[in-house]
Amino acid sequence: MSRVSKKQAQKSKHTKKGNKSKKSSSPLWKKILIGILALIAAVLIGGMGLFAYYVSSAPDVTENNLTDTVSSTLLDSDGNEFWALEGESRELVSENDVPQVLKDAIIAIEDQRFYTHIGIDPIRIAGAVVANITDGFASEGGSTITQQLIKLSVFSTGTEDQTLKRKAQEAWLSLQLEQKYSKEQILTFYINKVYMSDNQYGMGIASDYYFGKPLAELTLPEAALLAGMPQAPNAYNPLTNPEDATKRRNLVLDMMVENEAITSSEAQEAKSVDVSEGLIDHSGEETNNLVFDPYVKEVLAEVERKTNLDPYTSGLTIYTNLDMDAQQRLYDIVNSDEYVLIEDEDIQTGISLVDVNTGQLKALGGARDQEVQLGTNYATELKRSVGSNIKPLSAYGPAIEYLNYSTYEQVVDEPYNFKDGSPVNNYDGNYEGQISLRRGLVDSRNVPTTKIYNDVPKSQVDEFLTNIGIDTSTLNTGEDGLVESNAFNGDITPVDLSAAYAAFANGGTYTEPYTVSKIVLADGEEISLKPESNKAMEESTAYMITDMLKDVASNNSSRVGLNGIPQAGKTGTTNYTDEKKIEYNIPENGVPDKWYTGYTTNYALSVWVGKDDYFDSIDNVGSERLLPQQIYQALMSYVSESVESSDWEKPSSVVEVAVEKGSMPAKLAGPKTPSNKVVTELFVKGTEPTAVAVDSSKEESKEEEKIELNAPEGLTATYDEEADALSIKWNAYSEKDISYLLTVNSDSYSTNDLSYILQNPPEGETSITLAVQSGDQTGPAASTSVLIPPKKEEEEPEEEEPEEESSESSSSSSSSEESSSAPAEIPSSSSSSEESSSAPAEIPSSSSSSEESSSVPDESSSSSSSSQPSSSASEE
């Protein structure tokens, strides 16, 4: 390298080092700090600009805003105002009327730095920011009493106002308010403004309503109670929710101790006072509000649920679907003896009337003899099984919709078990053999219904129920989804049930039931709350279900008749398990729930009758069992007077076909088919039979060979308590070459004997049925039952006794097997009844049989299956 090149290289290297040294003269941390400060400055400038922009459009706050109630008005379906969310009187208390104990209580629970902040509380805001970052926006509020007053006077407490813009405006107006009014004036405005449940506004009005005294005379526990109510007035109402009201009052007292307003001993003394002490009883007051109270309760819940607006503070005009005439008649029906006689004062009702063409709820029956406003509403809150009312929804509807079953579809009514081995029982304990789909639904046969339910894939059953508004995740307590017994059991409210049946009534369209058509905000903005309708099923499904349910209404015409108006309907009865009957000493004919749901082309009406205490039964053989039908008839007759009620028109997708009764698969009736063998049934178009039944005259010889089987006679069962043995006997059948199908609880077997002895039968009711078999024919069954009383505990046996007992048992078994009348073995309870009736086998030892059997006579679901609800359905 030349000297010149070497110098140039050194110069270049020196220059680079110099540059590098120059760059490192400014530390990295300084740059980061400058960047952060610049960012903070930009955020502050931007935030201040955004804040200025938001507050520029903030509304003005006048003294009228601070003193007037922002009430909401409810209009009925005719546009008449029937209720206003405001107190009947608006007497405002002055600063001098407010006792110090109430001030201390309010400040302790709502705003402990009230007297020191400027309208907003930076410390509280910082805490709320942290909570909102960790738990989500609006998870915790930082509002002072001043800010709450602004919300109550100008905005609202609903979540729609929990926006950054509204928060900025709220803070700005709070700062302005603190400049204009004193702390005592602001606190007094707040005391006069808050909602205190039962349509009472202001703590002065509330003090008189709840305690019959002015604010100045409030005791410490009373003041703490009132101070805690504004956060959730209905939840902390001492008249309707004393337990929650007590917890809230005690929290206020604890906060007063923390704020050094009272001592710990004073707080403890106040907590020892029962929250109901000194309360005024308003149950005896005459008020028309109770007539429509259940409807109002649902209106308020619906508005809050669909809009997040607070109807108590948002100044809304609410257009409801209430038919006031229907609501008044419904109230009179269940609360007087003028239309229906309800002798037991403990009986309660839940009732829902819906317009089938719009989905509008027209009237609601929340409860009988309601004494408080916004009380229990059984129409919307009931958590009880609907029994057989679910059958068209879960079994028959899906079978027609997805499998194209006809109303003639044949199914065998016979002994049948769930997959776990527990028996399915019909309401009468009998079996009818081969019957039609129509017969299965109209006579509410549980065995055929369960078979049909199991024919349809569960995903399709779930889809069908979901399409008609039934939440399958809540059908069964403790189960998240469908179970086998949903063929005839499931928890559905009267409102949801009436809306589901409405889809059958209108040709297959489902509309979520609703009480409010629209609301109008204080500024005139209109919001529609009408839900969208959806196609829930084919017209053919709706029409065929309706056609079958018309037979149910016809069979009950003396109870539900509407003077010739076409109608359809379904009864429903639930039952207790055998174990619960014994445990709660329930009468033999006692049941927890009775239902009737019916509809015309105008209305669907669902009626539940029961008692608040599930184990306080109603009589299923006396007049009480008819109450649902009687209530239905009284109300449906009334609402149908003013409308034209037409019959349902058969859609083109359904064909009516004359088939030969008993043919399986269905065959068209032939020209010589006897008239008594011809039945007319409905088929989905394209699925009707094409084959014609063979001329019956050519089959006469074969028909003569067939025996018309009847139920056997003389079936008796006697329990010998001393021998701990159940003896079953019956008379010999008149025909030869037959066998007997005996079913004891869940175990069935075929035998030629005329008796059977069951050793060590299980406690409780033992169900027994007996039918005659000839070839592939099984006749109708005779039935009886025996109540096995609780067994006494035996003394602990000596060491040799087990061997002796075993020997005796073996000897007895051997003797039984060798005797000429020895029946064959009963199959295990897990085997199906169809298998057990086809081939005889050996009888297991009676101890094994008694351990496995657990049937509930005359009930519809087993108590032994963990996947089944605790109650079972039956039908009259």
Image (cartoon, grey):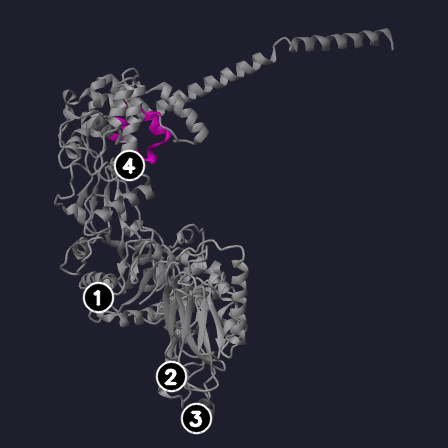
Give the structural element (helix, strand or loop) at label 2: strand
* Quadrant assignment, res 11: top right
**Which residue bears the numbered disc 1?**
644
- Which SS does the magenta portion mostly show? helix
Q: Residues within 10 Å of mark 4 (few under 14, many from 20)?
A: some
Q: Which residue is mark 2?
A: 678
Q: Is residue 411 left or right of residue 305?
A: right
**Where is residue 406 shown, x and y percent of the image?**
42, 73
Residue under the point 31% across and 41% down: 304
Secondary structure under the numbered disc 4 in the rendered image:
helix
Residue 697: which disc?
3
Amino acid at dot 2: Val
Q: In the image, which is nearer the foreground, mark 3 or mark 1?
A: 3
Classify mark 1: helix, strand or loop: loop
In the image, taking residue 201 as reference, residue 263 lies left or right, namely right
Instruction: Tell me the mark number nearer the camera, choosing from 1 and 2.
Output: 2
Question: Looking at this view, is 538 or 231 the one in front?
Answer: 231
Whether residue 176 is situated above or below residue 401 in the rendered picture: above
